[in-house]
Image (cartoon, rainbow, N blue to C red):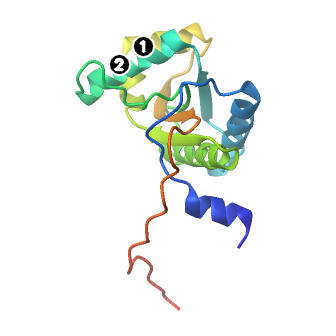
Amino acid sequence: MSDVLNKMKTRRSIRKYKPDAVPQELLDQIIEAGLYAASARGCQSTIIIQVTDEKLRDEIVKMNCEIGGWEEGFDPFYGAPAMLIALAKKDWPNRVYDGSLVMGNMMLAAHELGLGSCWIHRAKEEFETQWGKDLLKSLGIEEDYEGIGHCALGFIDGEYPETPERKENRVFYVR
C-alpha cells in the first residue's frame, strides 16, 4: 500500500497536545498542503489564517466555548498550541466543500509530519460576529469570508489512537 493511502487510513483526531510550539517550517508545509487542495472550477476561494499567538488563541478558545455552550475553563482545542483557520469567500457556492478539502489536506499533512490535528467547529459562527469581522479587517481582509473550520495542531501528548475497524455495508456497487 502506498504511504499516502496508509496515512489516510491511520490519521486520527488528537485531543491532547503538548504545550511545545510547532516550528514554523512545519506549519508552512501544512499550509502549503492546504493551498494545494482541490477547489471547484479551480477558484481557490479559500484562505488560511495561522494562529500561534497565545493571546489570540485564548480569545478564540473563549469565543468557541461561548458559542458551544461550554463552561469557562474548558479548552475545545485540547491545548493545541497552534491553529490554522480555513475560511472561504461567502459568495462562493462551493465554499464549504472547498474549505473542507483544505482542512482534510492540512490534517493529512500534519499526520505525515508527525503532528496531531483535530477539526474544531464553530469557525462559521465566530466569523459572523463583529469580533471575527474585526479580526479579518485587522489582517487586511476586506471581502466577506465564512469560517469553515479550525485545524488544531500540536505535538501529541500520549499514545497515538488506534485505527478502529470500519463499519460494514457502507459501499454499494452499480456495475
Number of on-image labels: 2
Give the residue drawn at x 56%, y 42%.
116
Residue 162: where, in percent of width, then height?
A: 48, 60
Query: Which type of secondary structure does the marked residue at label 2 adopt?
Result: helix
Quadrant occupied by the N terminus: bottom right
| Amino acid type of the residue that numbered disc 2 sits on in the rendered structure | Met
Query: Which type of secondary structure does the marked residue at label 1 adopt?
Result: helix
> Dot 1: few (<14), some (14–19), or many (≥20) neighbours within 10 Å?
few
Q: Is residue 100 above or below residue 137?
A: below
Residue 175: where, in percent of width, then height?
A: 53, 92
Q: Residue furthest right?
A: 25
Q: Is residue 85 visible?
A: yes
Residue 118: where, in percent of width, then height?
A: 48, 41
Which of the labelled discs sits on residue 74, or is there none?
none
Give the residue drawn at x 61%, y 12%.
139
The residue carrying mark 1 is: 59
Q: Is residue 128 visible?
A: no
- Given residues 39 and 114, the one toward you in this image is 114
- Given residues 80 and 121, the one toward you in this image is 80
> Dot 2: few (<14), some (14–19), or many (≥20) neighbours within 10 Å?
some
Check if mark 1's residue and mark 2's residue have beta carbons within 8 Å: yes
The residue carrying mark 2 is: 63
| Amino acid type of the residue that numbered disc 1 sits on in the rendered structure | Glu
Give the residue drawn at x 65%, y 28%.
22
Q: Is residue 128 above or below residue 154?
A: above
Q: Residue furthest front?
A: 158
- Given residues 68 and 19, the one toward you in this image is 19
Give the residue drawn at x 53%, y 13%.
54
The part of the image, by quadrant, that contains residue 154 is: top right
